Image (cartoon, rainbow, N blue to C red):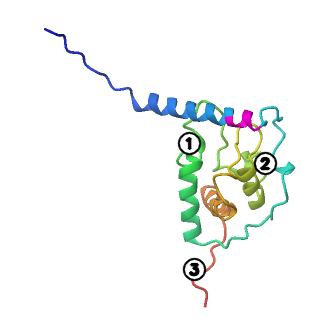
Amino acid sequence: MQRGYTVRAIPMTVATRALRLATFLSLGLTAAAAGQSEASEDTGPADDPAVPAVNPTPYTQAAEKRGRTHYLRHCQICHGFDGRALENIDFEATDLTDPERWRFGTTDGDLFRSTKYGAGLDMPPFEAELDDAEIWELVHYLRSLGPEEYRAAAEPENPP
């Protein structure tokens, strides 16, 4: 007679942490392969090509909603569902709800540049995953996470 074995499920938090650690390590390997591992912490968006300081994509609720989709697909793993970056203990992601903690600037252009080209050692570039229009939509969503004075002014969805 064989003895029955019970399989115990791994708690979701452990599985989630393992997935996040694997993602972080793969991002590090990608950066090393791209020759970015030797960059200093000060290397950031200011070193990259000029970007408009103001978002050229007009703000609409639809643009913000598309930006949220991009955020959930590409940014949530590091910055958390609500942008506070509290879930990940493996590395330091920026709290996107507090612009005073943004190390590479607070203008729309700064957010675009940090997203497209990366910022410092912890923020990888997303130029291969998102096109410029998608990054500008993401900027609209990032603005919605922070204080009221940093949010975009709504333009009419259907102007007269």
Q: Identify residue for label 1.
A: 77
Task: State which quadrant residue 137 falls in.
Answer: bottom right
**Residue receiving disc 3:** 157
Label number found at residue 104? 2
Looking at the rendered structure, the secondary structure element under dot 3 is loop
Marks 3,1: beta carbons within 8 A = no
Look at discs 2 and 1 and give the one toward the viewer. Answer: 1
Residue 152, image x, y percentages: 66, 67
Crowdedness near tag 1: few (<14), some (14–19) or many (≥20) residues, C-alpha within 10 Å: many
Quarter of the image where the C terminus is located: bottom right
Residues rendered magenta in the picture:
30-34
Badge 3 amino acid: Glu
Dot 2 lies on which element? loop
Q: Along the horizontal axis of the image, is 110 left or right of 130?
A: right
Q: Is residue 32 magenta?
A: yes
Magenta stretch, overall SS: helix
Between disc 2 and disc 3, whose residue precedes?
2
Percent x, y for residue 20? 54, 34
| Three-letter amino acid code at the position of disc 1 | Ile
Check the image and report above or below for 110 versus 124.
below
